[in-house]
Structures are given as C-alpha cells and as structure tokens.
Amino acid sequence: MCGITFRPSGRRSKRLHRLFASAGLAALVLSATPGAGSALEFPQFAVRAPGDTLFAVGAAGPTPAWIEFCTQLPKECAHNPSEPDTIVLDQATWKLIVDVNEQVNKEIVPVTDQDHWGVADRWDYPDDGMGDCEDIQLLKRRRLTQAGLPQRALRMTVVIDELGAGHAVLMARTDRGDYILDNKRNAVLPWQQTGYRYVKREGSDSVDWVWLGNQAAPVATATK
C-alpha cells in the first residue's frame, strides 16, 4: 500500500516508490510539522464541531491484501456490534493513544512490501520488527485494543498522501472527532490537519469498508 502512486483519475498505479527504505528518510518523515502542536497536547474542547468527524458516503471494496489478511486472521477483522463505535476521550486515554503511536513508530523499521516480502502489497503484523504503513497501523490497533479500547472505534483507513501516493493510517473515532495515528509523524492529529485526502476505511456497522468520498483535509501539514 505505502508509496503506491495514484493517477489523476483516482485509479491506483502499480508502480511502488521506496519512500521508507533508509533510516534517514524514516527519521525525517517521523518529525512533526512545525506548528502542528505537541503529540501529547490534549484536545481542549468539550464537544465535536461540524467537520470534526468524517462520515461515510457509500460502500467501498477493501484491498485484495486486506481480504487475504482477514482470511488468515479472521478475528482481527471481526465486527462486534456490542462495542462502542467511538472512544470517550479523556487525558489518560489520549496519552495511551499518543504513546502507542510514538512507541510503535520507533520500534518498527519502515520497509516496503516488495523489499520485505517480495510482493507489491501484503497486510500483516510486523512481528520481525519491519513493516510498511499498514503493518505499523495494525500493530498500533492491536496494542490499543489489548489496552482496552474498542476495535470498532479504531478503523484502518486508506488515504492519498502529500506525494499523491496511497497510504494507510489508523483512524481513532472519538467523541471529540476523528484522530489519525500515522507512521509519518509522532503527533496524533485531527484528520483535518494531516494534509491527506481520505478515500475509504473499515466500516463501523459491519465488516464492509465504506467510501469517504476522497475528502481533502483542509489544512495541509504533512511533511515529506
């Protein structure tokens, strides 16, 4: 998924860019954008404002690699309607989210699926300490659910990044809006501050994915 170029038509190109092959580049993209705020800054507002939450606008198909991942690990993709679909955000929960985001970013060496597995796209846990964007987000989700957060509120999400390439992030759906955990930065940002265009994510009401309408974040703060 990471580094796949999107054509202007919106269809995915098969050409992979090795964005995270070197440790130097990995360190660069993990640096937060000036003015983006501290990774530990707790959102200081009580209720959601219009635009804080990304709503689905239709059905979407998952990537073939996601289907294969779910076939191998069906429990990781199961839908539990008894779980809440949003996280009640307080200071302790916020610290847990940002800590997990930063810890996993530091632990996992970014590497493309082509270099790692010899295939264009594979979703899996980075148990050997290496992985690309979706593998890193899957590990974050596993740690957050193990800490007690509802998986139904932690949605794998496909975006188009600042380079026009396909990228996977983890969306934490909270009572204060949708926040993005990303391997490109340690700061956990509201979706509007990432600079990404949002294509699709796991649905909250079933195992099906939902279309996000290619909505663009109004504030471009993503770094190269």
Image (cartoon, grey):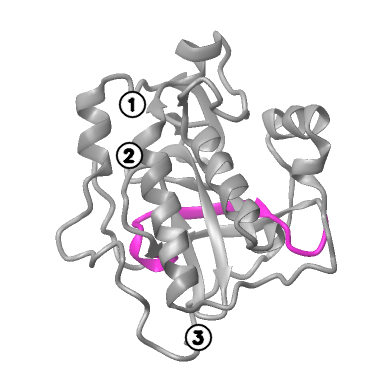
Q: Identify the residue shown where x is 48% and y is 79%.
A: 90
Q: Residue furthest bottom?
A: 46
Question: What is the span of residues highlighted in magenta in the rendered image?
Answer: 190-206
Q: Quadrant of residue 29?
A: top left
Dot placed on the residue nearer the N-terminal end, 1 or 2: 1
Q: Is residue 205 magenta?
A: yes
For badge 2, the amino acid type reads Leu
In the drawing, what numbered circle is on residue 195? none
Q: Residue 31, how many percent across, how many down?
A: 21, 46
Q: Is residue 85 above or below residue 11?
A: below
For badge 1, the amino acid type reads Phe
For badge 3, the amino acid type reads Arg
Name the residue carrying label 1: 20
Q: Residue 208, how many percent across, how many down?
A: 79, 51
Name the residue carrying label 3: 48
Q: CA distance from mark 1 to mark 2?
A: 13 Å
